[in-house]
Image (cartoon, rainbow, N blue to C red):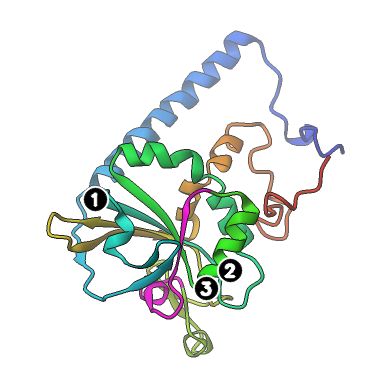
């Protein structure tokens, strides 16, 4: 079968426009119910309690060493993409890079809603900047090399933790194959400059940053990942895809 064609074996039956419209309206009712549920969950998320961040983390940035509070810039909210890029790696994780490819276009809009965004990884700043330049990204990287930020927020694990048979990831104890994991964390800063952790999500929750998936879900083939060895096996760094 041509890779660009729709699998006829799973193609829905062909109908006239009125029958299609009836089916579409039935699905629309379910979509609207999901939207209302998402709105309810978003409101509950905003109502979560906060935790003060007292540890004095220092990050390496292009502007010099910065505290977590200083990463906010002029904003009172900060979103962190926990980027999988460990010391010694030649390049960042391709799945985290897939996430990051969606960041630049959102930066101006996020800033208008009082939100700063930064990617934080454990690799040294020089390695992060070399990779950022290669990928052509404009968003900021900060290096947590030498501090415990990634471990404290559940996206980096020690060898001892992994050898114990399970790590604490995505709010559960589970085996995990890597010392690095993806995630998103959100922080708030009050008028006195105190920083609070308000929210984190991990695992499939990070797909919220992958706008490409949202678009694919609207198409007949969807993500088209069922026959792959693992769901994101098709993903490459955007400068490593083979040309058609």
In the picture of the structure, the residue carrying the numbered disc 1 is 76
Mark 2 or mark 1: whose residue is earlier in sequence: 1
Q: Disc 2 versus disc 1: distance between alpha carbons?
A: 29 Å
The location of residue 41, given as percent across then percent down, is 30, 45
Q: Quadrant of the N terminus?
A: top right
Vertical placement of 91 versus 2: above or below? below
Residue 171, by quadrant, is: bottom left
Dot 3 lies on which element?
A: loop
Vertical placement of 116 versus 192: above or below? above
Q: Is residue 153 located in the magenta-colored stretch of the structure? A: yes
In the picture of the structure, the residue carrying the numbered disc 3 is 124
Mark 1 or mark 3: whose residue is earlier in sequence: 1
The location of residue 228, given as percent across then percent down, is 73, 55
Q: Quadrant of the C terminus?
A: top right
> Do residues under tags 3 and 2 come within 8 Å of each other at their CB atoms?
yes
Q: Which residue range is magenta in the image? A: 138-155
In the picture of the structure, the residue carrying the numbered disc 2 is 127
Residue 89, by quadrant, is: bottom right
Q: Disc 3 versus disc 2: distance between alpha carbons?
A: 6 Å
- Residue under the image location 70 percent in, 23 percent down: 13
Answer with left or right where residue 149 lies relative to residue 175.
left
Question: Extreme left residue here?
Answer: 192
């Amino acid at each position: 079968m041509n890779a660009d064609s729709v699998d006829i074996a799973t193609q829905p039956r062909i109908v006239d426009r009125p029958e299609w419209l009836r089916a579409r309206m039935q699905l629309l009712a379910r979509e609207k119910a999901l939207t209302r549920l998402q709105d309810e969950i978003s409101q509950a998320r905003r109502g979560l309690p906060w935790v003060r961040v007292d540890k004095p983390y220092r990050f390496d940035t292009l502007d010099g060493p910065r505290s977590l509070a200083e990463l906010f810039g002029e904003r009172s909210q900060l979103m962190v993409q926990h980027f999988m890029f460990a010391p010694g790696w030649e390049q960042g994780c391709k799945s985290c890079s897939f996430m990051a490819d969606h960041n630049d276009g959102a930066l101006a809009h996020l800033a208008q809603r009082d939100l700063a965004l930064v990617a934080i990884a454990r690799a040294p700043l020089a390695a992060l900047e070399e990779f950022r330049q290669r990928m052509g990204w404009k968003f900021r990287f900060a290096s947590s090399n030498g501090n415990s930020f990634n471990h404290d927020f559940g996206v980096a694990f020690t060898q001892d933790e992994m050898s114990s048979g399970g790590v604490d990831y995505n709010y559960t104890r589970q085996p995990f194959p890597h010392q690095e994991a993806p995630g998103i964390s959100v922080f708030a800063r009050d008028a006195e400059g105190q920083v609070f952790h308000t929210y984190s999500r991990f695992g499939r929750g990070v797909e919220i940053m992958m706008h490409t998936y949202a678009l694919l879900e609207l198409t007949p083939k969807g993500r088209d990942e069922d026959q792959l060895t693992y769901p994101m096996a098709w993903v490459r760094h955007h400068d490593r895809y083979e040309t058609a």
